[in-house]
Amino acid sequence: MKNKTVKYKTLLFDLDGTILDYSKSEAAALYGAYSVVFGIDPPDELLPVYQKINSALWKEFEKGTITIQQLKIKRFSSLFDSFKLNTDPAAFSEIYLQELGKGGYLLHGAFDILESCAGRFRMGAITNGIGNVQRSRIKKANIGQFFETVVISNDVGIAKPDPGIFAIALENMNLYNKKEILIIGDSLSSDILGGINAGIDTCWINPMGKEPGEIKPGYTISDIAGLLEILS
Ligand SMILES: [Mg+2]
């Protein structure tokens, strides 16, 4: 734990896995798109296979080895190859993204935390994702009012952990004192590494009790409710 005398004034939140339930949105979108395209319910193995393919591709994207456009198509071309299904991955991707935008599911306790921090802290959100999908989900979840800025990687052409995306949030909010800022997120490779790269304190949400390894967060909490203790 860091020095408790630090007084944070601004909170920069990650969205997926931190505030929004991406897993639930993803499952619903995949189920929905598959049902629309094939006219039947998907096989049970579809989701876990898709998640494996998708998370590997997001890691590639974070490393800068593929573009978001490639990711959007490749996750479905790989998926359909492994299920020996013949459908256009680009067309499926469009339907999937429409379905994904409907998924404004909040993680347990997240809305209450945002509400209790509102007014006491300035808040922003930084998310690696697709602009219209993320904006639609934020609207569905009714959390847009909490954030002075929402920086979405695909809109700005920079993704976490690049410190440039945090710089955009700071600029949008006219923030100069990094010592008064805390970044909160569930991903070591994007949020925590990004915060370290940007010279800003970090708080890692680690519900599964994973080992941090090389990337060392300033604070670790198992649940977003734990944030209140750090901020008190
Ligand atoms: Mg996340």
Image (spheres, rainbow, N blue to C red):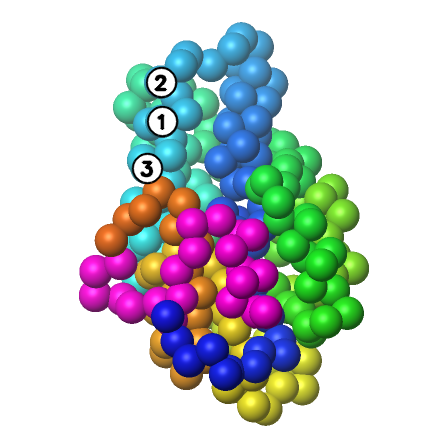
Q: Which residue is mark 1?
A: 48
Q: Which residue is mark 3?
A: 53
Tell me which residue sits at (47%, 14%) in the image: 42
Q: Nearer the viewer, residue 173 or 84?
A: 173
- Image coords of residue 215 (percent x, y): 27, 66
- The extreme bottom residue here reads 176
Q: Which residue is mark 2?
A: 45
Give amino acid for label 3. Answer: Ile
Element class at badge 3: helix
Q: Nearer the viewer, residue 213 or 47?
A: 213
- Camera-near label (1 vs 3) is 1
For marks 3 and 2, give the CA distance. 12 Å
Tell me which residue sits at (63%, 32%) in the image: 99
Q: Which region is colored magenta?
A: 212-232
**208 in the magenta segment:** no
**Few, some or many C-alpha atoms within 10 Å of disc 2 (few <14, some 14-19, many ≥20)?**
few
